[in-house]
Image (cartoon, rainbow, N blue to C red):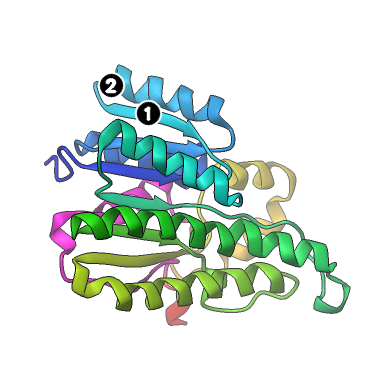
Amino acid sequence: MRTLEGQVVAVLGGSSGMGRETARHLATLGATVVIGARRVDLCEELVDSIRRDEGDAAAIGVDATDPDSVRRFFEVLQTNYGRLDAAFNNVGRTLGHSPTMDTPLERFEQTLDFNLKSTFLCMQQELRLMSAAGRGSIVNNSSIGGTRGFAGLQDYCAAKWGVIGLTKSAALESAAQGIRINVIAPGLVATERFELIRSQQSALLDARIKEIPMARPAHMHEVAETVAWLLGPNCGFLTGAVIPLDGGECAA
């Protein structure tokens, strides 16, 4: 069923991993997917692939940590399509691993920029477009690191906890305007980076998988399908929610 037929959906951080898989899946559901990332060449490759499968997509380069770049992204989107119906903010990454007392301030600040500031900047522009239309849906990507702590990743966890707080606050502000905002909190996901780490540090990943009650990582298509449900019409009364995609870790 093409539940997103005719919808204009932005996917920020769509050049690889969960963003790439989600953009592809949204296109199969009928959405016009506007894909943004710094690696615009990879976004354009994805657009070509989606079009070969008779989907509709476009690529716009964006640095989600740069307010001017984010503003230009949404200006181009609005000029080309006239509206924004939904968005998936899949922005963020880890920059290192160290005890709190040894973590450089520069890395801490950069981690907040990549994960929290970027989500904030994207949401500001998305909400401006959606408020004018009186409807819309946003999904932010946090992490299991936004619901628990991980030793050595205090900067990343702080940022991802912040994404959840940002989501809940904005959801309260926007509910009466017909805009829903939810957040996913994935645990271990079998992305390209997962495969790279497995080839280099298989023992580390094996130990991590033992912490997961379902004894495996999430598949990227499982993330994509969850995001599509949250953005779509069959999820019309859910807002401000944190959806754990962690194989049961948060229940332990």
The answer to which quarter of the image holds residue 111 is bottom right
The image position of residue 138, as x and y in percent, is 33, 59
**Which residue is at a point 48% across and 30% down the rendered structure image?**
43
| Helix, strand or loop under label 1 | strand
The image position of residue 149, as x and y in percent, is 62, 78
> What residue range appears in magenta?
218-247
**Which residue is at a point 71% across and 56% down the rendered structure image?**
203
Q: Count all numbered tags in the image, as a single digit.
A: 2
Of 175 and 141, nearer the camera is 175
Give the residue at mark 2.
Answer: 53
The image position of residue 31, as x and y in percent, is 23, 38
Q: Is residue 132 magenta?
A: no
Measured Cα–Cα span from mark 2 to mark 1: 14 Å
Q: Is residue 95 visible?
A: yes
> Label 2: how many residues lie within 10 Å, few (<14), some (14-19) or many (20+)?
few
Left or right relative to 158: residue 134: left
- Identified by mark 1, the residue type is Ala
Of 38 and 102, nearer the camera is 38
The answer to which quarter of the image holds residue 151 is bottom right
Give the residue at mark 1.
Answer: 58
